[in-house]
Amino acid sequence: MESKNGKTRFFTASDQDILDGRTTDVYFVRTVEVLKAKGMLHEEATAELTVARLPRDWKWSVFCGLEETLRLLEGKNVDLWGLPEGTISPSRTQSGVLLPLLTMEGVYTEYCTYEAPMLGFLCHSTGVATMAARCRKAAQDRPVIAFGVRRSHPAISPMLDRSSYIGGCDGVSSLMGAELIGRAPEGTIPHALIVMMGDPVTAFKAFDEVVSQDVPRIALVDTYSDEKAEAVAAAEAIKDLFAVRLDTPSSRRGSFSQLVREVRWELDIRGFKHVRIILSGGLDETTIPPLVEAGADGFGVGTSVTNAPTVDFALDIIERNGRPVAKRGKFGGRKYVYSCPDCLNYEVTASLEEVPLCMSCGKEMLRADVKLLDKGRRVQKQSSVEEIRERAMKQLTKMGDLDAHT
């Protein structure tokens, strides 16, 4: 595969390829060709980003990928309004109208060919952030670390870790992902080191001897023998052992909750109550709660987060030259988005003179969408990843059960 800037070793697009529109669908290029031939290059259109239905049984999503979208559209002659990145929202308003997360106005051919990469940024990132948030909520106050970059293409590992962190993971394992969010990468002693060293205790001691003392000692205790036996051996081998990690394969797992209880008991009766128990291996929002109840102190999540279902956003034209239009299944006309900060309900109106009331608490709603781009120029200051994560976590605390309506 050849990039515009020369040959690439791996099957990935460069930043310039994306900015040049080379990752778009061909039918958008042909659309521009037709509009040009028919003298319609300067026709204006308003388009909005919505999702008709969230994946699986999700009742809400964590909006993510906006920063990359803004970087894509900067300099284009378009205006953009939207919900801030990190916003938690349903797919529809309290009255059943599709909720616009972004609204774009301008000459249609200015943004036509960027629809595909824009949707790619938003759909994928939002899916990852939402699954991370679901795991975060399931884990309650226990730490959750993103371990899953090995399950996806390495070119997108920074995006995966950023989205995971925004959604609620407390740390990430990849070097580039950690650098992007401004945190140290986190990890444990791996199986590979134990296998290479020949036995667990030798590996535990070697790791403790060689690796910087700034790195917490977390020993993987399921390589060759019983987990509780290796956990005790690790606690005896490493003076300042922070935690043991159980990554027991499913073929040997039996009751993971019972295994946690056994390991906890054996550590405690030997004076190692301070050693925490961290779990990994096929965990998601459904398998974490019973492990919390069993006494697990933290979780490593991988495939369930990085390979989370994509949120199927669509970008649809809802006005042409200031007049309402919409294809079947969509709601035509420009809309203004309001929300209740207490109940997290949403509503839209066709006029700024209408201020809707929250159907749950009866309060007047507040305008939720903000102007992001004015003729391609940023209006809002760029939010840090910490600010975006804090926004998401503040809303997450107000959510009820994972699958309850807000």
Image (spheres, rainbow, N blue to C red):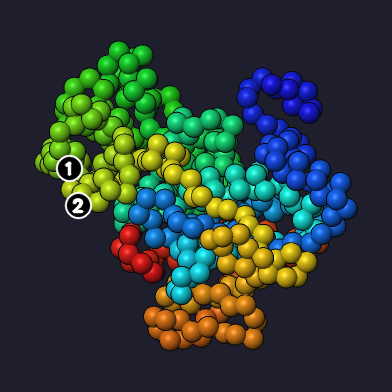
Q: Count neighbours of disc 2 (C-alpha within 10 A) and say few if under 14, some if 14 to 19, many if 20 or more.
A: few
Front in this rendered view, residue 376 or 39: 39
**Where residue 276 sits: x, y (%)?**
27, 43
Along the polypeptide, which appears first: circle 2 or circle 1? 1
Residue found 85% across the figure and 50% down from its top: 38
Front in this rendered view, residue 1 or 372: 1
Image position of 214 (left or right of 3): left
**Residue 84 visible in this rendered orientation of the protein:** no
Front in this rendered view, residue 241 or 42: 42
Q: Dot 1 corresponds to which residue?
A: 257
Residue found 67% across the figure and 39% down from its top: 25
**Residue 73 visible in this rendered orientation of the protein:** yes
**Where residue 365 sits: x, y (%)?**
52, 81
User: Is disc 2 in contact with disc 1, using a CB cutoff of under 8 Å?
Assistant: yes
Image position of 296 (left or right of 345): left
Image position of 391 (left or right of 398): right
Image position of 95 (left or right of 49): left
Q: Quadrant of residue 406?
A: bottom left
Q: Dot 2 corresponds to which residue?
A: 293
Residue found 25% across the figure and 28% down from its top: 249
Q: Quadrant of residue 237?
A: top left
Amino acid bearing label 1 = Ser
